[in-house]
């Protein structure tokens, strides 16, 4: 009898290129596919080095750790599930990712607290929580968590439309890969 498959994803670029990160077996947790991450980070390549990044539904940590691997100055991983948080903390220690901070919180609670503004934000909520994306898009603006010219990545079930974007935001990229719709917005 073979062992159960490990929940693992590969970092695809930067200093940790090819390193595998383990993540907790949390229901509904689905790391952004390699192909989508590659396209996303090609889009972000001009701005990721030195950026302050927020991964608001960190899950596996694939997006935030990929950003750190590619030179982001600071990355905050926010996750609500305690098992996922422990796995993220273990990966941060294993990679010696000193620029990465793991925060155990609900996304809306994190945005409601006073805090810093970011250059790049990754919004990849569970597909089952259809309202989360709209709530967080509005919350980022209300909490003033975006720097001028911030990029916001939005990942959705491709069968669902994007929520309305706040005034001053424009959709600059949009693609689909299987059941994943992925988009990049710019905050002017």
Image: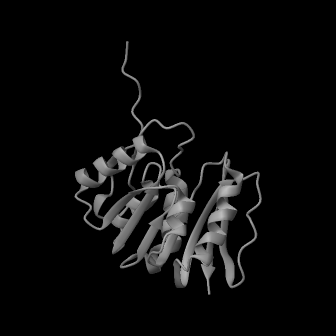
Q: Position of residue 55 (x, y in %)?
A: 47, 62
> Looking at the rendering, which quadrant does residue 138 occupy?
bottom right
- Residue at 53% in and 43% down: 29
Q: Is residue 176 above or below residue 10?
A: below
- Residue at 39% in and 33% down: 6
Q: Position of residue 99 (x, y in %)?
A: 29, 68
Viewport quadrant of the C terminus? bottom right
Work out whether residue 84 or residue 82 is closer to the camera in this orientation and state it: 82
Q: Is residue 111 above or below residue 34?
A: below
Q: Is residue 142 visible?
A: yes
Say left or right for 83 vs 145: left
Say left or right for 44 vs 177: left
> Looking at the rendering, which quadrant does residue 104 occupy?
bottom left
- Residue at 69% in and 64% down: 134
Work out whether residue 44 or residue 78 is closer to the camera in this orientation and state it: 78
Question: Which residue sits furthest top?
Answer: 1
- Residue at 38% in and 54% down: 11
Say left or right for 180 vs 52: right
Question: Which residue sits furthest front?
Answer: 113
Viewport quadrant of the N terminus? top left
């Amino acid at each position: 009898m073979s062992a159960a498959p490990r929940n693992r994803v590969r970092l695809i670029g930067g200093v940790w290129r090819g390193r595998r990160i383990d993540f907790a077996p949390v229901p509904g947790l689905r790391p952004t596919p390699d192909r989508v991450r590659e396209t996303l980070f090609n889009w972000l390549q001009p701005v990721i080095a030195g950026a302050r990044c927020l991964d608001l539904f960190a899950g596996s940590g694939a997006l935030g750790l990929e950003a750190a691997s590619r030179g982001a100055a600071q990355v905050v991983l926010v996750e609500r599930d305690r098992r996922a948080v422990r796995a993220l903390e273990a990966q941060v220690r294993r990679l010696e990712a000193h620029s990465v901070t793991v925060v155990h919180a609900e996304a809306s609670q994190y945005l409601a607290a006073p805090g810093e503004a970011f250059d790049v934000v990754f919004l990849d909520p569970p597909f089952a929580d259809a309202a989360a994306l709209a709530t967080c898009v509005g919350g980022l603006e209300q909490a003033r968590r975006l720097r001028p010219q911030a990029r916001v990545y939005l990942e959705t079930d491709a069968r669902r439309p994007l929520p309305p974007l706040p005034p001053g935001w424009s959709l600059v990229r949009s693609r689909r890969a299987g059941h994943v719709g992925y988009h990049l917005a710019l905050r002017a």
